[in-house]
Amino acid sequence: MRQFKKPTYAQVNDDIVRTLVETGPTYYVALGTALLVSIVMFFLPWYYQLRTGVGLAGMNQPNVWGSYLANFVFWIGLSHSGTLLSAVLHITQSPWRKAIYRSAEAMTLFSLIIASFCLFVHLGRAWFLHWAFPYPNQMELWPNFRSPLLFDVMAITAYLTGSSVFLYVGAIPDFAAARDRVCGWRKNLYTLLSLGWRGTDMEWHRLGVAYTFLAVLIIPLAVSVHSVVSWDFAMSIVPGLHHTVFAPYFVVGAIYSGTAGIVTMMFLLRKYFSLESYITTTHFNNLGKLLLLLSLLWVYINMLEIFTGWYSGSSAQIETLNYKLFGYYAPLFWGMVLFCAIIPLALIVKKVRTSLVTMLIISVLINIGMYIERLLILTTSLSRKYLPDYWGIYTPTLVEISIFIGSVALFICFFLVFVKIVPSVSMYEVKETLDSPDRRR
């Protein structure tokens, strides 16, 4: 594979600022397409559903939950590895983190925003969202502090706030570096965002203390968010959902899908923003090792979930388990096993981990499998409750499929705007990994 020469300190600033100010027609086509798809396939179907009712979705009795909640869980899971991986690698002083963590943190932020939109869609009557917020009221009926929905709102709000602050604080020196190299409205914007940063010893010291404190704080927040999401299901008495293993199950799955999302995003950034000198095969190699480890953990927890359902001896649990493995949704289940358990075993080979196109394909397949997993958690459990006369089959409608595709386009739209405003690679931290005689900023 082609080797790229390490840049000097000045070249780091020039290369990253170039990604902000130089915009070709391909970018505008991609942004316009993503914006159009998000409007046509997300906001318009959602508006139509608000006008008509949630009967447009395939949800019915007994499948009162469907793809909207699966979308919510998927995007919450995708948000995990960005900030969480960045925080863990910062605390452990891993040098390969420095070139990729900024974009990974942005992925966390936008995934949480999309997850919030998906939750609004699921609620049906989004104008009653304030009922889920913990505020004092005279009727003493809302909010219901025993509702898992309230847990979700509090956990996601805390994680979204912490991730936003974590991303912004780490970007302040880069805003200052960009401020000194641009003009026009960008200079005014970066002057405001840099908060008067001058790069003094005291400023660097305070930044290091604050950033480390936020990194330590964000780790339990990230773990708690998906644990709380898992309790939405585990606190029920529905066979197939009532498992104590759901909290670690959801957390491992979230980190797994989030890491795969980082691989996809790094490939696209490297290719279309010419960042080959910064995002190298070392990053893909290390992320491939992490994906392999997470795939093994995911397989172990899935086997544990299946075993506990079988070992319980409960006829309802065994019926749900048989339905998942051999029933109507069995092709989806075994497809999930193929994408998330079997194909990632190829990552044992170093040539696979350092082949960028192969890593892209594997990461995309993993996230397809993880979305199927979130959908199966709901459909195979709710379809086979206790009484046979209450069994049913859930199939997503075109409105649901459209809203999911639109949510992906909306995420792409957010990220394309982000890479033209915020430096996608941390300039000052990349410089720490260089041995360059040119120390000019």
Image (tube, grey):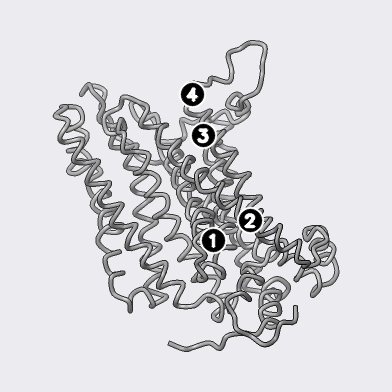
Q: Residue 57 is drawn in which quadrant? A: top left
Q: Could you tell me if the residues under marks 1 and 4 are in contact, i.e. CB atoms within 8 Å?
A: no
Up the image or down, 302 lies above or below 427; here it is above
Q: Quadrant of the N terminus?
A: bottom left
Label 4 residue SS: loop
Q: Label 3 belongs to which residue?
A: 152
Which of the two labelled residues, at mark 1 and mark 3, occupies the earlier sequence position?
1
Q: Residues within 10 Å of mark 2 (few under 14, many from 20)?
A: many
Q: Amino acid at mark 2?
A: Tyr
Q: Position of residue 238 (x, y in %)?
A: 30, 27
Which of the two labelled residues, at mark 1 and mark 4, occupies the earlier sequence position?
1
Which of the two labelled residues, at mark 2 and mark 1, occupies the earlier sequence position?
1
Q: Label 4 belongs to which residue?
A: 147
Q: Position of residue 56 (x, y in %)?
A: 47, 34
Please give the name of the residue rendered at 17% of the width and 33% of the height, measured from the top-left corner: 318
Does residue 74 appear in this view? yes
Q: Could you tell me if the residues under marks 2 and 1 are in contact, i.e. CB atoms within 8 Å?
A: yes
Q: Amino acid at mark 1?
A: His
